[in-house]
């Protein structure tokens, strides 16, 4: 399918971490529908963790197809092309990503391709043209899944695939083609937009795994004014050199990802705009009414305009599933937070018991 610039721009809607189970949240759908109505994007990218939960699906292909169809219906019912990335949770439902990819191919307006040249599923490049020549390339990359400890990275042969595609375009057109990358898990260089801080600092979040024992705040001199970070980046355990490769020739203008539902910010690192897109799903933890989606507007002058759209602003301050929404607001984002919170609760209970015992002795 050929994608062309309309007027001066080409608008991509990124939807991250819907992470639905056997029943799709009406609030998730309200957010997606409102965003599409407001922005009328040229292309929609679901950037991973569309679904999750082995107990919810148990490999039931019909159930998985029903849920994926419901999530994608806002796109294809409006005849808007859409593509997908896979996250770390999609493959946990009992069907492989390759099997799910075949389900997506049944839906109208799906434009996914699966490169056989490298690891993962749904790696592809999409041309956006003007006057018959590419003005931008959009790379969709599988960032894989969880390891025994932490998260995997984009593999070396995927990086080589990207470099080969980049170089082939450069050879054909005698110039590098400006590009954007969308994937699920962030690149490690996202931490260059943070400042290590004292845990008592306003807005500080606790790091874990590679960042254990440290606390961070956003570097407000580098990120967008409305950006927020409510959890530490869960970046790969090993840096495979993806970002380094994507800065070699200056073609990549932006890399956008999801994965950490409570984060939405972007800023320039070594000439590349790195951007977190917050979670869109209301059946999983998230940033309250700041759940949202991201607009990535590509310009003919090779620049990018990007911003998020938040539920509170485009839908309102009420949700349909009030009890579940309230419960998910206190859900910890990871096991480290859960243990830390449990220790605090146990310590408080112990303190109360000790106080009661002391009062009885007096």
Image (cartoon, rainbow, N blue to C red):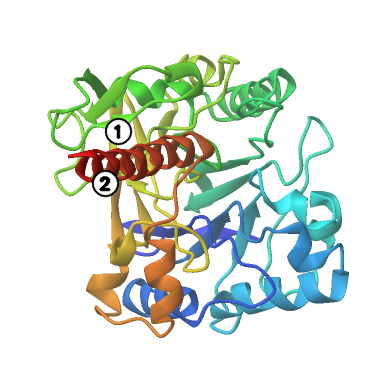
Taking the image as shown, residue 360 lies to the left or right of residue 333, namely: left
Categorize mark 1 by other alpha carbons within 10 Å: few (<14), some (14-19), many (20+). many
Secondary structure, mark 2, is: helix
- Which of the pair 91/126 is nearer the observer? 91
Could you tell me which residue is drawn at 20 percent across and 44 percent down?
359
Could you tell me which residue is drawn at 59 percent across and 84 percent down?
77
- Which of the pair 275/337 is nearer the observer? 337
Residue 158 falls in which quadrant of the image?
Answer: top right
What is the x, y in percent for residue 11? 40, 60
Residue 82 falls in which quadrant of the image?
Answer: bottom right
Secondary structure, mark 1, is: strand
Taking the image as shown, residue 199 lies to the left or right of residue 83, namely: left
What is the x, y in percent for residue 182? 52, 43
Categorize mark 2 by other alpha carbons within 10 Å: few (<14), some (14-19), many (20+). few
**Disc 1: which residue:** 205
> Where is 28 relative to 297, above or below?
below
**Disc 2: which residue:** 356
> Where is 265 relative to 24, above or below?
above
What is the x, y in percent for residue 249? 46, 17
Distance between mark 1 and mark 2 Cα atoms: 34 Å
Q: Is residue 301 visible?
A: no
State which quarter of the image contains the C terminus: top left
């Amino acid at each position: 399918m050929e994608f062309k610039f309309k007027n001066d721009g080409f608008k991509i809607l990124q939807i991250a971490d819907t992470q639905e189970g056997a029943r799709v949240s009406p609030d998730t759908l309200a957010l997606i529908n409102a965003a599409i109505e407001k922005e009328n994007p040229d292309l929609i990218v679901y950037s991973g963790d569309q679904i999750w939960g082995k107990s919810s699906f148990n490999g039931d292909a019909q159930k998985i197809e029903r849920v994926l169809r419901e999530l994608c219906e806002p796109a294809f019912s409006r005849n808007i092309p859409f593509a997908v990335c896979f996250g770390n949770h999609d493959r946990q439902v009992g069907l492989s990503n390759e099997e799910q990819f075949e389900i997506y191919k049944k839906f109208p307006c799906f434009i996914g391709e699966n490169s056989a040249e490298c690891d993962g599923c749904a790696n592809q490049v999409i041309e956006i043209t003007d006057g018959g020549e590419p003005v931008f390339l959009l790379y969709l990359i599988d960032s894989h899944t969880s390891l025994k400890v932490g998260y995997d990275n984009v593999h070396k042969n995927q990086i080589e695939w990207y470099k080969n595609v980049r170089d082939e375009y450069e050879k054909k057109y005698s110039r590098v083609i400006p590009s954007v990358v969308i994937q699920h898990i962030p690149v490690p260089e996202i931490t260059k937009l943070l400042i290590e801080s004292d845990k008592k600092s306003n807005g500080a979040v606790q790091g874990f795994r590679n960042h254990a024992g440290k606390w961070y705040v956003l570097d407000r001199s580098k990120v967008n004014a409305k950006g927020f970070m409510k959890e530490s980046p869960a970046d790969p355990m090993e840096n495979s050199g993806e970002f380094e490769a994507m800065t070699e020739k200056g073609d990549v203008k932006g890399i956008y990802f999801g994965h950490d539902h409570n984060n939405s910010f972007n800023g320039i690192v070594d000439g590349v705009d790195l951007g977190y897109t917050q979670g869109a799903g209301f059946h999983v933890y998230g940033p309250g009414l700041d759940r949202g989606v991201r607009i990535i507007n590509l310009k003919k002058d090779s620049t990018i305009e990007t911003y998020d759209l938040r539920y509170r602003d485009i839908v309102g301050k009420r949700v349909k599933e009030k009890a579940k929404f309230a419960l998910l607001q206190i859900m910890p984002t990871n096991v480290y937070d859960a243990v830390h919170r449990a220790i605090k609760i146990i310590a408080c209970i112990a303190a109360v018991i000790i106080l009661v015992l002391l009062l009885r002795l007096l």
